Image (cartoon, helix red, strand yellow):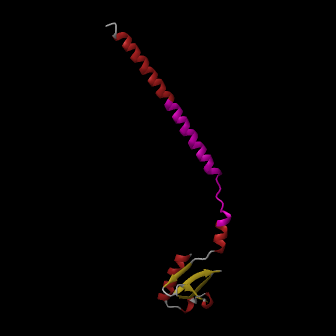
């Protein structure tokens, strides 16, 4: 019976230390999470997105072209253009502005679908 008392004492000391360590761990964990969320929030508020020089150059010099069957369509300077495609090459010399006023409603809706996809 004398062996039970030191064993119980030893067991209660270990249990008390485990509880203390657990409380310390939880306290540290909550402090770290709170600190992380606070720094993340401050970083998000201070972050300002700016375009890179490369992105601005591409945006300025790039043009989206839709090729449908044997025609190519694009917008340049708020003008909608169309031209022929020969052997996969766009013939820019034959480019002409699309005259939307002289189109049937079917042709007009067809061109609007193309326009929606390239802008």
- Picture residue at 68% right of the left edge, 64% below the top: 53
At which x and y percent is residue 96? 60, 90
- Decide whether residue 72 is among the magenta residues: no
Residue at the outermost bottom position: 102
Which is the main secondary structure of the residues drawn in magenta? helix
Residue 16 in which image quadrant: top left
Quarter placement of the C terminus: bottom right
Please determine whether, in this image, residue 8 is positioned above or below residue 116. above
> Bounds of the magenta span?
25-54
Q: Nearer the viewer, residue 86 or 15?
A: 86
User: Which residue is at a point 51% across and 86% down the rendered structure image?
Assistant: 108
**Residue 26 image point, x, y percent:** 49, 32
Q: Please state the horizontal and vertical placement of residue 4, each as a whole percent of the image.
A: 34, 11
Compared with 95, 34 (above or below) is above
* Residue at x 63%, y 50% (from the top left corner): 45
Q: Depth check: 25 or 45 in front?
A: 25
Q: At 50% from the left edge and 91% from the top edge, which residue is drawn? A: 104
42 inside magenta stretch: yes
Q: In the image, residue 83 lies at what x, y percent?
A: 57, 88
Q: Residue furthest left?
A: 1
Position of 58 with respect to 117 (left or right) is right
The residue at the far front in this view is: 87
Q: How many marks?
A: 0
Relative depth, front residue between 66 and 86: 86
For the N terminus, the image quarter is top left
Residue at the limit of the structure toward the top, as seen here: 2
């Amino acid at each position: 019976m004398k062996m039970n008392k030191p064993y119980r004492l030893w067991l209660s000391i270990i249990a008390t230390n485990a509880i203390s360590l657990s409380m310390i761990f939880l306290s540290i964990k909550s402090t770290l999470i709170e600190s992380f969320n606070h720094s993340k929030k401050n970083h998000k508020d201070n972050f300002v997105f700016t375009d890179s020089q490369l992105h601005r150059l591409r945006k300025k010099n790039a043009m989206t072209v839709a090729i449908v069957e044997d025609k190519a369509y694009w917008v340049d300077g708020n003008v909608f253009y169309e031209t022929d495609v020969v052997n996969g090459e766009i013939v820019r010399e034959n480019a002409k502005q699309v005259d939307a006023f002289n189109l049937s409603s079917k042709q007009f809706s067809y061109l609007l679908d193309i326009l929606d996809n390239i802008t």
